[in-house]
Amino acid sequence: MNAAVVKALEALGVDCAVRAVSNGADWQVGRGAPIVKHSPIDGSALAEFAGADVTQVDAAIDAAAEAFLKWRVVPAPVRGAFVRQFGEQLRKYKTELATIVSWEAGKITQEALGEVQEMIDICEFAVGLSRQLYGKTIASERPGHRLMEQWHPLGPVGVISAFNFPVAVWAWNAAIAWVCGDPIVWKPSEKTPLCAIACQALFQKSLAEAKGVPAGISTLVIGGADVGKQLTASPKVPLVSATGSVPMGRAVAEVVAKRLGRSLLELGGNNGMIVTPSADLDLAVRSIVFAAVGTCGQRCTTLRRLIVHESIADELRDRLLKVYAKLPIGDPTAAGTLIGPLVDEGAAMQFDAALAAAKEQGGVIHGGGRVTENVPNGGAYVRPALVEIDAKAAIVQHETFAPILYVMRYKNLDEAIATHNNVPQGLSSAILTSDVREAELFCSPAGSDCGIVNVNIGTSGAEIGGAFGGEKETGGGRESGSDSWKQYMRRVTNTVNYSRDLPLAQGIKFDV
Ligand code: NAD
């Protein structure tokens, strides 16, 4: 096994005989289907073990349900104090966790560290939130009555996560759910099992130092889609928070809706940016390149469609191509590398297939193809592609999870906004402009139809303080900051009569 990963796991107290299931403080050997994991960096073997089976998934859900009975009555600020302790563990082991993220997901060191920082940030947010789970007091229409709202814990939250944010997405859910009084049952991506094991190990370290925290507030079941399906179908899981592709989200939504549960969906994006004639092109180049090729195009918020005014399109393309030509591609753990590998060969094949389709549909391709020199053997390294293409080409409607940037031209802003919104997904968007009217129009109800609408920055790299998520096929969910916490709680409306009379609402007379 890879020495850097072994060292990082050992620092976290994980022995390298990998276990697939944890109901809190314990580890269990899986009895289900095999999980085999190779590093995207060099194909080296990282883990091979059996995943969770049906009875183990049931047991994890039961452990969470049992923990809920205790955790829901722990005062929220005390729950917050536990999240603060967990955040301290993340600070202490930031480098080790980032090392595992790099080796398992292929992220460059800076982005892996940034992902762990995002976990620390959400813990801080959640600690503050633990004293701010406010309900409203509402004026009653009846004399001698008080109307008020309370927010109560909801129950076990099923978290299904994707490979590309293998630790932060869990933390977004866990930190908020914990202060809200909910346990978590986590089904991570089968492509990033060690990241999940490392997070659970850090939870266990916090648990060992804490008093009165039921172990079952964090349970882990590693496995494939079948494990996710079982979690989704369980009536003991009132909320399923699922991050991943649109087909996965559709499947989850159908199952959860059928049992009238709640789902929080964070699905695929097809993110666009409009660059207007007044844009600062230096800033445009930097923000476009980070958004389009960062994480090798494998962020849900990756910039995939660039809609440029025809008067500046040639200049911007030429400047981008100059930067694309010298992007440092290679080992993501090496200093200076900006583009690591795709997650696996399957992703590289989709990259090749999308470029072939774009060419067939009239696209002019710049870049693309495999990189084999100065990169580790055994990984799927590709050269990011920029494709000049007509906005009506069918390929532009699809999210290919790889570094392909489609570049289109526009004549007037209304047409550009219509083009921007004319895709099935609605996650992130941006406009680059120095004209306040253009910026405000893009942010207005007649502008971008996405959940994230930026001005003079790219589409990726959101902060945790805002609500994160998108519309249309992106699923409509909002996670992380702002008032996303409300989805993890149930709202209770209380009417309290402190009079000696019984006036009825709406003035109804019902004398007995
Ligand atoms: P994926 O859909 O292949 O897998 C995501 C998770 O869903 C995995 O844990 C998988 O095992 C599980 N799963 C698959 N089918 C399931 C089913 N029927 N029922 C229950 N669980 C099931 O996604 P991926 O390839 O890991 O990640 C890439 C995708 O995720 C992209 O589309 C990307 O845009 C999206 N994503 C979205 C966000 C967001 O916040 N909107 C964040 C990260 C990734």
Image: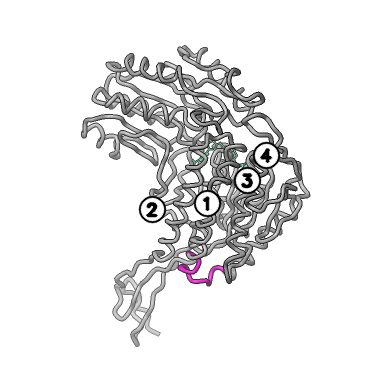
Q: Report, in whole angstroms, how far the alpha carbon at label 4 lies from the one at label 1.
A: 26 Å
Label tally: 4
Q: Residue furthest right?
A: 31
Residue 311, image quadrant = top left
Kind of residue indicated by mark 3: Ala
Q: Quadrant of ligand 1?
A: top right
Q: Which residue is mark 3?
A: 8
Q: Along the line of sight, which residue is nearer the eye, 433 or 128? A: 128
Could you tell me residue 69's position as x and y percent? Answer: 59, 69
257 is within the stretch colored magenta: no
Q: Earlier in the sequence, mark 3 or mark 1?
A: 3
Q: Amino acid at mark 2?
A: Ser
Label 2 vs label 4: CA separation?
A: 41 Å
First in sequence, mark 2 or 1: give its number.
1
Element assignment for label 1: helix
Q: In the rendered structure, which disc, 4 or 1, sits on the residue that comes first in sequence?
A: 4
Q: Is residue 94 left or right of residue 220?
A: left
Which of labels 2 and 1 is toward the front?
A: 1
| Numbered range of the magenta stretch | 71-80
Q: Is residue 503 visible?
A: yes
Q: CA distance from mark 3 to mark 4?
A: 9 Å
Sequence-wise, the earlier of marks 2 and 3 is 3
Query: Would you say the residues marked 2 and 1 are in contact, meaning their CB atoms lie under 8 Å apart?
Result: no
Q: For the residue labelled by badge 2, is the local secondary structure a helix, a strand or a loop? A: loop
Which element carries disc 4, helix, strand or loop?
A: helix
Residues marked 4 and 1 touching at CB (< 8 Å): no
**Nearer the viewer's eye, disc 2 or disc 3?**
3
Disc 1 residue type?
A: Ala
Q: Position of residue 89 (x, y in %)?
A: 54, 56
| Residue at x-position 46% and y-position 32% | 302
Q: Main secondary structure of the magenta part?
A: helix
Along the line of sight, which residue is nearer the eye, 152 or 407? 407
